[in-house]
Every structure is written in C-alpha cells, then in structure tokens.
Amino acid sequence: MKYIQRNLAVSFSKANKLFPVLLLTGPRQVGKSTFLDHMAEPNRKFVTLDDLELRKQARDDPKLFLMNNPSPLVIDEIQYAPQLFPYIKMAVDEARREDPKNANGLYWLTGSQQFKMMKGVTESLAGRVGIFQMQGLSWQELTGRSEPPFRPDQFSVPLMKQLTPGELYLRIWRGSFPEAEKFENDQLATFYRSYVQTYIERDVRDLTQVADADTFYQFLQAVAARQGQLLNYSALAESAGISQPTAKQWLNILAASGLVYLLRPYSSNLNKRLTSMPKIYMLDCGLAAYLSKWSSAEVLEAGNMNGAYFEAWCVGEIIKSYLNNGREPPCFFYRDCDQNEIDLLIEANGIYHPIEFKKAAIIRKEDVRAFDKARKIALGTGAVVSMSDKDMLLTENCRMIFAGYL
C-alpha cells in the first residue's frame, strides 16, 4: 500500500529543531513507527523494544544499550524499558555541553502505553522533550488535504468530491487504522479480531492484573456501546460484571493508550448547574463497530446507533485536526440541568465556538436553539455539521458544514 502522508509531519519537523527528544504516543498500529521511518534521515538508526533481546539489554544495562545504539536514534515502544530515560537525559545533557547548536533531534521515541511512559518522561526529560499524539488516519489525510485545526469561524470549503451518506458510513464502519486499509470489507473483522487480541495480550496484561481476558473484552464492548454518552461507571461495571473501581481503572487504561477519548464538560465556577461527567468516545469507529457487532456499513447506517457513530466520527476528525497540528484539542461539551446541550465547544482566546452534529440532510434553526440557552458562555461563530450539502448560514452566527469536508 502506498504511504499516506501524515499531517503531523510539519509540526514534528519544526519541533525536531527545538527539542533533543521527541516522543510520539498513540494506540497500537496507528502508524507511529511507519511515520518515523518515513521522516528519518538516512543516518538515523531504528530499534524496537518489541525485540526481546534488545529489550533485555535496555532494561539490564541501559548505558551499554545507548552506547551500542548512538544517536540520532529511534527507539520504538520505549515503555518496555523506562530504565532508559535517565540515561537519555545524561546523553542529552552531555550533547548540550559539547555542542549546543547540534543537540536537538537526537532521540525519537514511540510508545503505546502512556501509563508507564509519562512518569519517566516527566521525571527525567522535563524541558528536553516535545510530546505528540497520533491517532489513526484522518479523513483529511485519506483525501490528501492538510488544513489548520478546525474552527467554524476559520473554515473554508475544500475542493473535493462530496460523499454520499452510504460512502460516509462505509468510512465510519471501516475505521482509521492504516493496516485496515489493506483489508476488503468482508475481511475487516479478521483485522479487528487480531487487533483486540494483541491489545489485550500485549498491553492490558502488562499494565494491570486482568485475570480473565474475556471479562476485559466484555468491558471493551460495554465502552463501545456507549459512543457519545455521559460516562457512567456503574453502568459500565454492571455490563462487564466488575466493580466500579475496576471499571474506572480499566477505562483510564483505555484513555491512556489513546483508544478512548473523554470529552470534558465546560465548567464555570459561576454556574454549578452544569454536568460534571465527561462524554465517552471510542475514537476509532471501526473498532467500536466491530466490538458492537455492526456487521456492515449498511447495517450501521440503518441501526439505532447511526447518529451516535456519526457524532463520534465527526468529533474524532476534529480532535485529529488539532493533534495533527501538534496542538492539544481545546474541546468541551455543554449540558446543564435543564437538559440544554451543545455537542461540542471549541475554545479560542476565551471564545467558545458551539457545534452541533446532525445526521440529517435537512437542518432547521430549531436544531441550534441550545446555542441561545448557554448565555453565560462567550459564544463565537457556531456550526451544524451534517449530511446537508448546502454551504450557507443557518443563522446570523451559525453556518452549515458538510461532514465530508471535515
């Protein structure tokens, strides 16, 4: 399969001139290693700690490991040998003393388990590391576009073929893992079955005492079934037959490994009537569809979760537009005790841009009436992201945006 250009390349290249160490995190098989291999200079060596012999040396004698593998160096799956972090720090500090102008871009690190990595990173590499997150392929990347982070007030219609609803749901159902692009529709379940098994065996068992893999699989299914819903630990625990503390621990693992995104609610000390629980999204809708037994794109489009998957896909694309520009997504949602809800708020300079997601192709002003209810928030230009192909203003301060343009 031809390499698909990743939009993170621009921000990553700029940071490589500013930091001695770059860390790329994200779920397994989203393309981290392939991306770094594509970005690397000819003299940059690549080692992976999936190799058990290299992993043992990195753990037992990290100093010798770095001597055997001098910079510039890529270390894949760094979480398997956190013992390396202090020695990378010493190597960086020595390089800075000897030649400060050439002390950047020495080490590129990847990892899919932030639980183990981030403590070592913050303790040993503070001030020396630029951190990036990668998700699966974005729709922008799949269509060869590279655009700024999404905001309704800065959006411009791209030149591209419009998607039909069926084509969009096929993209939602297939998901965004690069490796999945090699599989035909009737073979896709084979990929996801292998992915889940590998994730449980290699990541989950390494992070927590999961005695029963089947129980954790049931938990994954329970999470996938709650796309776009408010987080409810009690319901998750009951669905998987586990305790609430265990449900919280396992969800934290999913969030730390990048498979789940918790969209935080907007909060203000001036308004205590807002909800305090986040909304839960499994960002790869293909994985969620597999876990929820949606057997085809047509079945998903006709099912009772079609709106939830449409929203989850749109939220995921917006989140990726920020991550791929090297930025933390400034995203929230709004819900108060009167059930007024705004699907997404994007903050910029103290202004919140409200967004609604509607699977329908016909949009009415009533669809954004919640925008007028959130009067204690400084709202900017809003949008309704839908299947409507009309590029026009719905109200004076709210535009319509076709989902296929995200």
Image: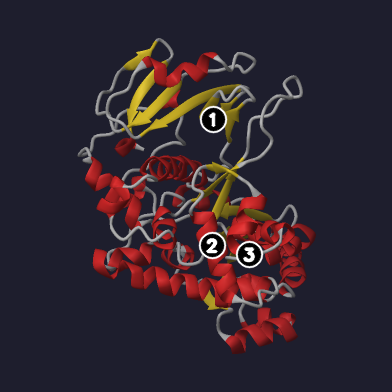
* Type of the residue with mark 2: Leu
Nearer mark to the viewer, of 3 and 1: 3
Identify the residue shown where x is 53% and y is 68%. 217
Q: Quadrant of residue 115?
A: bottom right
Circle 2 is placed at which residue position? Answer: 220
Residue 114 drawn above or below residue 172: below
Residue depicted at 63% across the width and 53% down the height = 130
Q: Secondary structure at mark 2?
A: helix
Q: CA distance from mark 3 to mark 1?
A: 36 Å
| Marks 2/1: CA–CA distance | 28 Å
Query: What mark, if any, has residue 346 been given in the picture?
Result: 1
Mark 3 surroundings: few (<14), some (14-19) or many (≥20) residues within 10 A: some
Task: Tell me the element at label 3.
Answer: loop
Image location of residue 364, percent across then percent down: 34, 18
Type of the residue with mark 1: Ile
Local secondary structure at mark 1: strand
Residue 74 visible in the snapshot: no
**For the residues carrying marks 2 and 1, which lies nearer the camera in this image?**
2
Residue at 59 percent across and 28 percent down: it is 335
